[in-house]
Amino acid sequence: MKKIIYTLNLNPADYRQITDLTYPFIKAWAEKIGAEFIEIKDRKFPQWKSPTYEKLQIFELGKDNDWNIFIDADALVHPDMPDITRLKEMQDMKTCAHNGCDAAFLRWRTNRHFERDGRNIGSCTWFCVAPKLCLELYAPMTDMTPEETYRQIFPLVGEQKAGYEPWRLVEDYVMSYNIAKYGLRFKTFKDMAIDNNLKDSDLLRHFYAMPVEEKIIRLTDAAKQWSLI
């Protein structure tokens, strides 16, 4: 099985304090599960305002891989994190996953794909797992222009307070759209953990919508709670 763990790091100098903390654990997890670790460092979609849209490069980069996993560079992975591709729900290689998900109708304008799909899945794209049969999870938007896509997005109140404009959530929208459009089978790691004897596990940490300085403090505190530093 060819497994790749991707992360996005377009401005390494700006995030050095974060990646110095998170990368050793992400790389250790990659080694544990027999995956290669690859950083996406260059922009391929400059027409999209959000740099984080670049994670959708995986649609092209991952065509020859059995598993394409994405994790944000500021996510903390516990050394006990299992190989998610071996969880029973994933073994037929027909299911994609996030750590968790939101309610789509709280964040996105509805359309025929969401209505037909009916599952109301709002992607949280800091942790994404897709086998080759679900590569469309990472498909770039082709049905709408960037501006048309931004008009489908409604940041939650907490996101608005943190300064998030619709364009900053575009990859969350696009992956939600892809799950609905292509009818992708979908699970969350949180739900699978319960069914795989990992109930109450605390194996992933990600802190969202806050300044870098605060994020560093929280990541450091989390690592200390786990007795990792």
Image: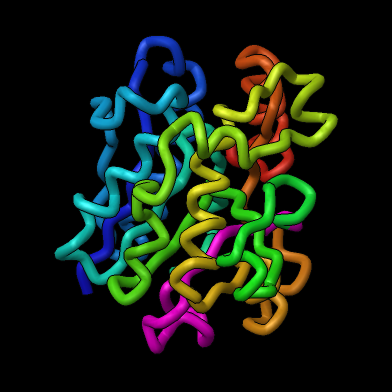
Front-most of residues 125 and 184: 184
Is residue 136 depicted above or below 56 in this figure? below
Residue 86 in the magenta stretch? The answer is: yes
Q: Residue furthest left?
A: 64
* Residue 197 shown in magenta: no
Q: Please say if 14 is above or below 191.
A: above
Residue situated in front as seen by the camera: 77 or 224? 77
Residue at x 78% of width, y 66% of height:
200
Q: Position of residue 133 (x, y in %)?
A: 32, 76
Residue sitting at x 62%, y 67%: 188
Residue 136 appears in the figure: yes
Q: Please state the extent of the stretch shown in magenta in the rendering.
A: 85-103
Query: Is residue 20 visible in the rendered structure shown here?
Result: no
Asked whether, in this view, residue 108 is left or right of residue 79, the answer is: right
Q: Quadrant of residue 105?
A: bottom right
Who's the residue at 61% across and 50% down the image?
A: 124
Q: Position of residue 134 (x, y in %)?
A: 37, 71
Q: Where residue 48 sits: x, y (%)?
A: 39, 27
Q: Give the image quarter of residue 53.
A: top left
Foreground residue, 141 or 122? Answer: 141
* Residue at image coords 52%, 39%: 149
